[in-house]
């Protein structure tokens, strides 16, 4: 895996105070941007953004946990995730341990 592009986002901690966290971009295809927070909470999941909308997807079940994106984009995202489930799990493990994960190949 090659180094991922990382963005910093403001996020609230448990007390509601803003914090900055690293959000590595792990893949990008057809306008869909996939990323994972470093040191994020369980269960294993990834975030995806498309056309200003966001979804959170459980890696084990490939169920949308939160959010909504265009159905066609969601279909492409799920196809990509099913092809790269092992990579996603490895990336999750890296991110949970505080290591900035590398890229996962896009859907071709």
Image (spheres, rainbow, N blue to C red):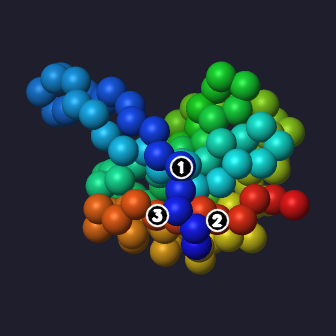
Question: Which residue: 63% across, 71% down?
Answer: 85
Residue 104 got which mark? Answer: 2
Q: Residues within 10 Å of mark 2 (few under 14, many from 20)?
A: many
Which residue position holds label 3?
Answer: 101
Task: Please tell me which residue lies in front, 20 or 47.
Answer: 20
Q: Position of residue 20 (x, y in %)?
A: 28, 34
Residue that sits furthest to the left in the current view: 15
Q: CA distance from mark 3 to mark 2?
A: 9 Å
Residue 49 found in image quarter:
top right
Q: Position of residue 90 (x, y in %)?
A: 49, 74
Question: Which residue: 16% across, 23% down?
Answer: 17
- Quadrant, the N terminus: bottom right
Side of 79 where 20 appears, left or right: left
Residue 56 appears in the rendering: yes
Q: Residues within 10 Å of mark 1 (few under 14, many from 20)?
A: some
- Quadrant, the C terminus: bottom right
Residue 5 got which mark? Answer: 1
Q: Mark 1 or mark 3, which is nearer the start of the sequence?
A: 1
Q: Residues within 10 Å of mark 3 (few under 14, many from 20)?
A: many
Secondary structure at numbered mark 2:
loop
Secondary structure at numbered mark 1:
strand
Q: CA distance from mark 2 to mark 1?
A: 12 Å
Residue 103 got which mark? Answer: none
Secondary structure at numbered mark 3:
loop
Side of 46 where 96 appears, left or right: left
Side of 93 where 84 appears, left or right: right
């Amino acid at each position: 895996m090659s180094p991922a592009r990382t963005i910093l986002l403001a996020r609230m901690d448990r007390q509601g105070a803003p914090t900055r966290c690293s959000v590595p971009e792990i893949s990008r295809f057809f306008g869909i941007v996939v990323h994972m927070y470093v040191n994020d909470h369980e269960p294993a999941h990834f975030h995806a953004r498309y056309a200003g909308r966001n979804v959170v997807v459980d890696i084990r079940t490939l169920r949308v946990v939160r959010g909504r994106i265009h159905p066609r984009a969601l279909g492409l995202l799920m196809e990509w995730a099913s092809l790269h489930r092992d990579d996603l799990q490895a990336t999750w493990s890296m991110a949970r341990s505080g290591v900035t994960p590398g890229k996962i190949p896009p859907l071709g």
